[in-house]
Each structure stands twice: as C-alpha cells, then as structure tokens.
Image: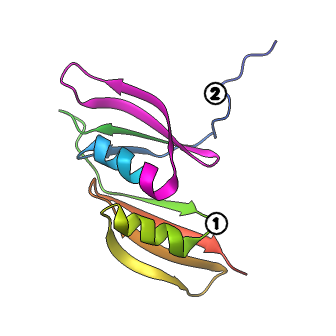
Amino acid sequence: MTNSYKPKAYNSVSPYLIVENAQETIEFLKQTFAAVPVRHIIGADDQIRHAEMRIDDSVIMLADKAEGWPSMPAHVHIYVPDVDATYQRALEAGAESVQAPEQKDDADKRGGVKDSGGTTWWIATQVE
C-alpha cells in the first residue's frame, strides 16, 4: 500500500483564509455554495483555529484571526453551475454585491460578492 503525500480527495492547492468571524464565513459558504464541513478545530478561547469546507472538488481552509495572524482581505474565484442563482444566494446570505453577473471579454459569465469576513468571491459559469 502506498501512502499519499496529501489527504484523499484533496486538491494540491487550497486557499487559506484568515477572517474576522470564521463561523459567519462557514455559514455563508454553506448557504451560498452548499459547502460541506470537513474539519473543525476550536481553540481554548472558543475561536476557530482551523476549519475546512468542501465545495464540489475543492477544499477551502479558514480560521479566525488571532494574535500574529490578522484577518486579510482575499479574492477567491469559483466556478458554479448557475452563476445567477449562486449570486442571489450569496446576497441572501448577507454578502455585499461587488459586481452583478455579466459576460465580458471571455467565455465566463461572472459576478462578485464580498462576505462579512472580508473575502471577495468571484462566481462564474462558463457559457461559451
């Protein structure tokens, strides 16, 4: 039996987000992208020290900010089956619109939202 260098069903690259309120981000990911929890580690101070959420074939890792680890704005691009429906779910989950979905100079229809933790999510569906 061969041991893998990474966990089964993980991609080689996963974004790691340090956010203001990791639990709010987790709820946003569940509501918007049907994300499924993979791991959840709570520190002695009841802050999320590490969490992993699976969205389709990818894992997003995140944690609450902590001393020496400030929250940082980030941009994450995600392909979804229906950009318009996903964008609407994001707004219903409390995200702020950055750009309504539209097709510009490439084959993607894309929109953007910013969640309460400071992450901007670029949501796209390939239409051509």
Disc 2 residue crowd, few under 14, some 14–19, many 20+, Cα 10 Å: few
**Does 111 appear in magenta?**
no
Disc 1 residue crowd, few under 14, some 14–19, many 20+, Cα 10 Å: few
- Work out whether mark 1 precedes mark 2 in sequence or the reverse, and give the earlier one: 2
Front-most of residues 73 and 115: 115
> Where residue 126 sits: x, y (%)?
67, 74
Question: Which of the image's four quarters has the C terminus?
Answer: bottom right
| Residue at the limit of the structure toward the right, as seen here | 1
Magenta stretch: give its range.
30-59
Front-most of residues 53 and 89: 89
Give the amino acid type for the residue marked by disc 1 in the picture: Pro
Q: CA distance from mark 1 to mark 2?
A: 27 Å
Q: Is residue 91 above or below residue 100?
A: above
Q: Residue at x 32, y 60 (%)?
A: 115
Which residue is label 2 attached to? 6
Q: Is residue 128 above or below residue 5?
A: below
> Where residue 59 sits: x, y (%)?
54, 42
- Secondary structure under the numbered disc 1 in the rendered image: loop
Question: Which corner quadrant of the image does residue 83 belong to?
Answer: bottom right
Q: Is residue 48 above or below residue 109?
A: above
Circle 1/circle 2 CB separation < 8 Å:
no
Q: Residue at x 62, y 72 (%)?
A: 125
Give the amino acid type for the residue marked by disc 2 in the picture: Lys
> Where residue 32 sits: x, y (%)?
45, 58
Q: Which mark is residue 59?
A: none
Which residue is label 1 attached to? 81
Q: Residue at x 67, y 28 (%)?
A: 8
Front-most of residues 48 and 91: 91
Taking the image as shown, residue 68 lies to the left or right of residue 4, namely: left
Q: Nearer the viewer, mark 1 or mark 2?
A: 1
**Does 32 appear in magenta?**
yes
> Where residue 7 sits: x, y (%)?
63, 26
